[in-house]
Amino acid sequence: MDTPAAKPLILIVDDMPDVAGPLAMMLEMSGYEVQQARDGHEALRFARDRMPDLAVCDVVLPQMMGWELCQRLKQMCAPRHLPVIMLTAKATELDEVRSYEAAADDHFTKPPDMKALIRAIAGLLEASKTS
């Protein structure tokens, strides 16, 4: 008998419950397992215990900027590719550039279009299976 495939684990790192909560609910309804962290240190502790399949990180976090967290998560996961999507309330081109310089795979402005974000997550997870 085939065992069901494990649900992909998504780590949401955001100190704003009004963003993290609805995103977590949408992801769970879309068939993903979700873990939430409020800051970079909490996210790194979680990732040491159980590496997620994808992370969605706010840029502005307590104690550690999201760009640093992105780099540290990717280093922890190497050589496997960990897709990371950055979220920011700042809609500047410089913030988007800094996200990609930190090796983020995508960048969304808050509040994100949830359907577009879910599609991006699905696409990145599918691509990471083949890489």
Image: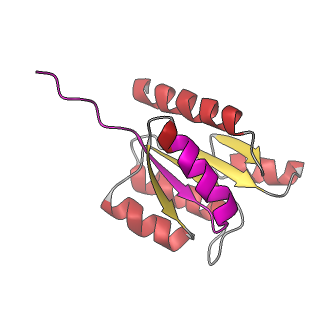
Residue at image point 40% right, 39% down: 8
- Front-most of 46 and 83? 46
Residue, far left: 1
Image quadrant where one finds the N terminus: top left
Residue 39 placed where, x, y %? 57, 71
Spot occupied by residue 92 in the image (x, y as percentages of width and height): 89, 52
Question: Is residue 90 left or right of 67 when viewed as pictured?
Answer: right
| x and y, in percent, of residue 7 in the image | 36, 38
Q: Choose between 55 and 38: the one closer to the eye.
A: 38
Image quadrant where one finds the C terminus = top left
Q: How is the image coloured?
A: secondary structure
Horizontal side, residue 62 vs residue 96: left or right: left
The answer to if 24 sits in the magenta stretch is yes
Which span of residues is magenta-colored?
A: 1-27
Q: Is residue 23 above or below residue 30?
A: below
Which residue shows up at 55% across the image and 55% down it?
12
Seen in the picture, residue 110 relative to 119 is either above or below; the reply is below
Is residue 109 in sight in this rendering?
yes
